Image: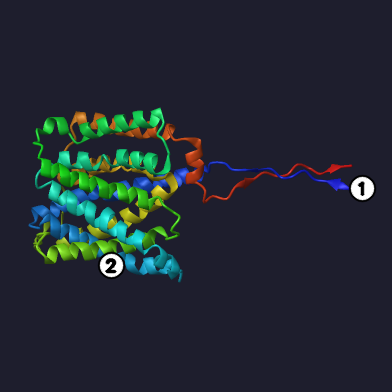
């Protein structure tokens, strides 16, 4: 008796595990980046310049990730030879460029204004994905962008800050926004085959060279002290604060950020990363005693609402494309049909 078997149906489903892990990595990255402001403020109050705190942060992170980055390559150095341009671009624009330009921006603008402009990066990512890849945003995506932007303005208390607008400062802040956009676009690209920890390690080493050069030429003022760093409820030695700043708010933050955007995509990942400002507000409350205003709490809720709306506006095809690394789910074939 011959046996005829039907062809097994192969279906591609969107893996919930990839979305869940992406959101978890994004939350870890946002929290890690968010604590940097409060730790950095502690060092500044102790006599450090912003340039010294930034250089120490990048140097420690690069040192911590060098060996893990080499091990993650597993001898696949051809990937680095092919993708060296990506690593350099990540280090120059996403790490060093974003931080240097923001540093210059706050010399002309209030911190809240500079942050608001830099964190328009998700809008730039949406436009880039549309113009470069033809991924036209849906109406929900656009609506979510406006909601998140409004929430960000409230969270940063821009309206109540009374800050002045300076053209030069705006230009530097826009340059920082470009660097942040590059961070999301390159971080979400899996085509180069570079492991997240290797990309982060290489980018931080490049950034260290750039920032070190800026410091040696006097472009980036450097000054530091060995004074004890004071927070609201405790004190800490300067080296401990610098170590946490490098290991947590740089090494961990960049690796987790790349892992998140590779799972969520550049567009959704960039909007979820706005929660970094919320995390920064919470850490400023805990470490510096800066109690958030009611308007900032409302802004935080709007940012979260905007991210949810952006997620709802993601096209199914794009979600599948973002999860292409997942193997297709193969359903069990039906029982053989005797003939």
Q: Quadrant of residue 70?
A: bottom left
Against 44, is 337 above or below?
above
Measuring from the top left, give residue 270's x and y in whole percent.
34, 43
Measuring from the top left, give residue 241's x and y in whole percent.
19, 58
In the shown orientation, is residue 174 left or right of residue 139? left
Measuring from the top left, give residue 287's x and y in whole percent.
18, 47
Q: Tell me the element at label 1.
A: loop
Residue beneath the point at 42% across and 39% down: 134
From the viewer's side, name the closer residue of 160 and 290.
160
Residue beneath the point at 9% across and 56% down: 46
Measuring from the top left, give residue 24's x and y in whole percent.
40, 46
- Structure colour scheme: rainbow
The residue identified by callout 1 is 1
Task: State the CA–CA distance, disc 1 to disc 2.
Answer: 69 Å
Sort mark 2 into few (<14), some (14-19) or many (20+) by Cα contacts within 10 Å.
some
Q: Tell me the element at label 2.
A: helix
Against 188, is 204 above or below?
below
Sort mark 1 into few (<14), some (14-19) or many (20+) by Cα contacts within 10 Å.
few
Q: How many marks?
A: 2
State which mark lies toward you, 1 or 2. Answer: 1
Q: Quadrant of residue 136?
A: top left
**In the displayed image of the protein, which residue is found farthest to the right?**
1
**Visible in this render: residue 234?**
no
Residue beneath the point at 24% across and 41% down: 282
From the viewer's side, name the closer residue of 84 and 21.
84
Which mark is drawn over residue 63? 2
Which mark is drawn over residue 37? none
**Visible in this render: residue 299?**
yes
Among the two numbered marks 1 and 2 on one chain, the one whose residue lies closer to the N terminus: 1
Against 89, is 157 above or below?
above
From the viewer's side, name the closer residue of 289 and 151.
151
Residue beneath the point at 7% across and 57% down: 47
């Amino acid at each position: 008796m011959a046996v005829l078997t039907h062809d097994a149906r192969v279906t591609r489903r969107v893996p919930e595990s990839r979305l869940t892990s992406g959101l978890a990595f994004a939350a870890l990255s946002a929290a890690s980046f968010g604590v940097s402001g409060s730790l950095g403020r502690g060092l500044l109050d102790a006599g450090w310049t912003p340039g010294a705190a930034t250089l120490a942060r990048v140097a420690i992170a690069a040192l911590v990730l060098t060996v893990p980055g080499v091990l993650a390559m597993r001898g696949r150095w051809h990937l680095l030879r092919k993708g060296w341009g990506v690593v350099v671009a990540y280090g120059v624009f996403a790490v060093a460029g974003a931080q240097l330009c923001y540093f210059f921006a706050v010399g002309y603008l209030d911190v809240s204004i500079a942050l608001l402009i830099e964190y328009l990066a998700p809008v730039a990512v949406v436009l880039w994905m549309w113009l470069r890849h033809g991924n036209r945003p849906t109406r929900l995506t656009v609506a979510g962008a406006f909601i998140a932007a409004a929430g960000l303005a409230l969270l940063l208390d821009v309206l109540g800050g009374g800050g002045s607008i300076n053209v030069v400062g705006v230009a530097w802040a826009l340059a920082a926004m470009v660097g942040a956009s590059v961070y999301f676009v390159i971080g979400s690209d899996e085509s180069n085959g570079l492991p997240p920890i290797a990309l982060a390690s290489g980018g931080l080493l490049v950034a260290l060279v750039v920032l070190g050069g800026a410091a040696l030429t006097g472009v980036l003022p450097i000054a530091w002290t060995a004074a004890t760093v004071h927070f609201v409820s405790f004190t800490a030695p300067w080296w401990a604060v610098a170590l946490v700043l490098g290991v947590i708010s740089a090494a961990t933050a960049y690796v987790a950020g790349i892992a998140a955007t590779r799972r969520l995509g550049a567009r959704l990942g960039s909007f979820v990363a706005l929660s970094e400002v919320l995390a920064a507000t919470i850490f400023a409350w805990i470490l510096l005693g800066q109690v958030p205003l009611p308007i900032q709490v409302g802004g935080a809720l709007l940012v979260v609402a905007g991210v949810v709306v952006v997620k709802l506006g993601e096209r199914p095809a794009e979600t599948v494309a973002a999860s292409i690394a997942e193997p297709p789910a193969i359903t069990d074939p039906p029982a053989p049909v005797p003939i």
